[in-house]
Structures are given as C-alpha cells and as structure tokens.
Amino acid sequence: MSIAEPPQSAPLPALDRRTLLKSGGLGLGLGASLAASPLAAQMGGQGFTHGIASGEPSQSSVLLWTRFAADQSTTIEWTVSENPDFSAVVSEGSATAHPNSDWCAKSVADDLEPGRWYYYRFIAPDGSASDIGRTRTLPEGPTEQFRMAVFSCSNIGFGWFNAYAHLAEANDVDLVYHAGDYFYEYAPGTYPSVDQALTERLGLDPASETVSLADYRLRFATYRRDRDLQRLHQMYPMISGWDDHESTNDSYATGAQNHQPETEGDWDVRKRAAMRAYREWMPVSDNPWEAYEIGDLATIYRLETRLTSRGKPASFAELLRGSQSPETALASLTDFRDGAYLDPARHMLGTAQEEWLASGMKASRGAGKTWQVLAQQVLMGRVATPVSFADALPENVPDFVRQRVVAGAMASRAGLPLNMDAWDGYPAARGRVFEAALNANANLISLAGDTHNAWAFELAHEGAAVGVEFGGQSVTSPGFENFLGGVDERLVSGALVQENAQLSWANTTKRGYMVVELTPSRATSEYRFLDGVRARGTALSGTQRIASEAGSHKLTLS
C-alpha cells in the first residue's frame, strides 16, 4: 500500500448556539418530523459547516459528501485530483445542498483509477472552498495486502475520540469501516449519567432523546463538530452501517427496547426519521446492503442487521417474569431454549439479504478470492455468562446491573447465551449464514462491534469450523469494567474464555479500535488499545495481534 500525503487539518469555526435555537422548532411533533425544518442548518452558521467525507468506494468511483448551509438551495462544484494542489484534476462535477436534506450534499466521482489515493474539495458559488479531503479507490486484479480500520460505539459523553485521532496520526490503512453506534440517542445525563459524563463533553444537542427528524439531524450535527471525527472522515473513505443507537437502543424492524409508543409516537415514523438523517449525514448510498470487491483478494459484504428484517429479540426479564423460585425460572428458560429460541422464522437479515449473501460468497470463491468478510454490527460468536460473575459483583453495583448478571448466569445454567440482541439470539438465522459459508467453501471473517469489548472467535456450526471473528472494542463506551470494575480483567477474560469454547481471547477493559490486514495467506487483526479516553491523547497502552491462516478457520495469538 502506498500512503499518500494526508491533507492539512483546517480549524473548526466557532459554534453559534444562539442562531441554532432561534427558530424554536425543537417542539415539533412526530407527525411533522419527516418534513421538519433542518434546525441543524444553523450549526456553525453558513457555508461549509462540517468538513467533508467520502465513502462507498469501488475500483473506479467514490461517493463525496459535504454540508453547505445557505439561504437557499445551492449548487456546489467538486473536483478530484491526483495531488493536493489540484494541478492534476481527474474528475469534476456538482452537487446540490438543499434544506430538505439538511444542507447535506452528496455526489459520486467516477472515471477514477483502481487502487489510487486522490484528493478532493468542494467550491461554493462565492468562491469559498471546503477543506481538502483524501480518499482511495479499491484495488483491481492481483492484490498482496489490504488494510482496514474498524471502529464502533463512540459515545461522546464518555470521553474523547482518541481512537480516531490515533488512526489519523498512524496513517496506515486503506479504508475505515464503522460498525455502528456512530452516535447515541439518549438524553444528556442518561448514558452516561451526569456523574459518569466527562465535563468537557456535556454540550450535547438536542437536550433530549432523539425522536424526531430534527432531533436526529441535530445529534449528527453535534457529533460531526468533533475535530477528531472530522479528521477521520477527511483522511479516509468510510464504509459504514448503522447499529441500534443511530435509531434507539435494541431496535428491530417493528420496534425497540427504548421506544415507548404512548409517549414517542409511531415507531415507523421514528425509524424513517433515523434512517433518513443517517443517509443525509453519512457518506453512504441508499442501498441497505452492499458488496465491495478488494481485487482478487477479498469481498467485503456490508450487512444490514437491524431495521429491515430483524425480529424482536427475546428478553430474559420477560421470560423470568412471574418465576417464584430458581427452579421455576430454570424451567421457563429451558422451555424457551427448546422451543421459541430455535424458531427459523426469527430473522436477522431476511430472506432476500440471506440469498444475496449466499450467492455472493459462492461467486467470490468461484472467482478465486481468498477472503469473504462480513462487515456487520453484532457478534456471531457464542458468549455465555460465566456463573462465577454473579458471585463476583461488588456490593455497590446498581440493581439493574445485578439483575442482568444474575439473569445471564441463570441463562447459562439453562444452556442459553448472554446477549439475545446479538446473533446468539437468532440461532437459526446464524445457522443459515454459516451453512451458506460452508457450501461456498468460504474463508469467512466476521467483523463486529456493539459490545464495547474486544473478542476473537473461532466460529463453528454443528461441529464444522466455519471461520473466524474479530470483535472490536469501543471508541469510548465502557465495557465490562463498568459493572465488574472491582474484578481483575485477567480473571474476567479468563473466565469468559474458559466458559465459551469458540472464544479464543477477550479484553474487557480497554477502548480503541482494530486494524484488520488481509493478504493471500493470512488475515490479522491488531487490536490497538488507547491509554484512556478521559483526556485527549493518542498514546497506546498496548496492542494484541491475532492471525488466521487462509483455509484454517483457526486463530493464533502473537
């Protein structure tokens, strides 16, 4: 990989909150939300307010994004060049910044060469220019190496986005994949609580949970003001997919744990608002799932596991409601394990996406590509709660945490996994994906986020080795240390590995990101752990490299 010179980072303009709230529209009802005025348009005043971004790369094209706030719809020009002084222009075009899209503008630059770094910028009618961005097309033909960074779970209230800043300094990947929870929907003081929140990160808008279109737009605008996030987008093309918090916690096709229809209105209205804002503010196409060809080396499949076809996840709280004794609780869980838990009608992807993925993996292997990579959101590897966790809880742990851990330990006794909101909660759906991978003779790699912790699994299905999974730690959101803070991390991860046969390694206390490197013979994940997130800084506290030889479906720690 030949690294191009990164563009300079431009200073951010001052934030003008007075004009932000001038329209008084924060009280818009849900019924009007899909036609809501773009309140976030006032964020940072007029002009280029939130930097630039690129995404959806192919061998000959890339999608370009910016935001240009004005008094009326404005056509802005863009230019792509082989160098940062724009003396070698290779593609030009225009995009329209319109109030109906919250002034966000996107356009596809094509006629590009494969496997090349390019520079791009936008120019307004008055001659003002955006920051200069850097992007890269995907390779074509023989490919000896491809490197991608994997991020997830970036809750702004818990700390600084030091992981983003570290990658910008490292300047050593071709592409970024964001596995979701790009932002969090909660009202300020909810998660994190006021006591947990970093004081310097308390200025969160809106000052309520995101429910309407205006709310989601404003939350995006707030996050995208972060200079480290802007720098990440400025330097790399991004493949991204939403998880739950871009809509609301534990969401699925027809509802969500954190949606109350009696006070927050119709779920479909809220879901459409969340999806619309995401597609406005992110450098993504409108396709719910997509494939990206990495020369003759790999195919990356961006999956949609949340809002299209996912069924309602099971709830241990509901399953155990009314149980009068440990015996009745265990009987209820066992009945569920042998019945509804195995229902093949409970989907994660839906039939259309499953068929697309199955045929895609077969075509990828038929074309001689070594790796088939699932860029998705939640763990595929099985994780059950070690029963010992219930005994290890500190005395001062919150009641809801204690109840969750105790329920997880009870589920383990019944042979059930910890997290019903992951693939563990949909075993038949997971089995169909694994069977498709086996039928295609795929070298399957699953990339996941969601849990805030770092994991490495050797995936198996009915005794057959299927592939490996690299589950990434969060950018800022806390992991198991949030409720097992008094327990040595080595004991926690050791107990998890001992309890779960597929799990080769885990780290439950460190924040950061992964760099996944693919070669014709090996796939490697380097877990990069930041010193912390409560103060700005890019120092690492350590790394862990885990590799899988092509065709082995096994992991080696180094």
Image: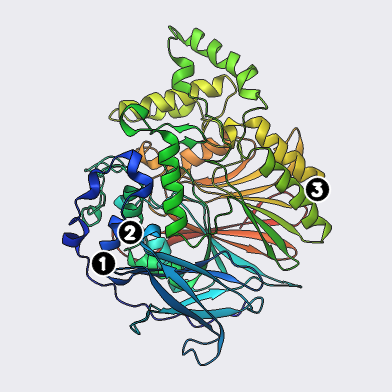
Q: Is residue 33 above or below residue 134?
A: above
Residue where numbered disc 2 is placed: 221
Q: Please, what is the three-letter code of the amino acid marked with disc 2?
A: Ala
Q: Quadrant of the N terminus?
A: bottom right
359 or 335: nearer the eye? 359
Q: CA distance from mark 3 to mark 1?
A: 50 Å
Whether the residues at callouts 1 and 2 have beta carbons within 8 Å, the answer is yes
Q: Is residue 192 above or below residue 93?
A: above
Kind of residue indicated by mark 3: Ala
Q: Which residue is mark 3?
A: 440
Q: Residue at (45%, 19%) from the top-left corner?
A: 318
- Residue 471 in picture, x, y percent from top left: 55, 48
Which of the pair 236/279 is nearer the observer? 279
x, y (%) of residue 222?
Answer: 30, 57
Tag 1: Cα neighbours inside 10 Å, few (<14), some, or many (≥20)? many
Checking the image for residue 44, the label placed there is 1
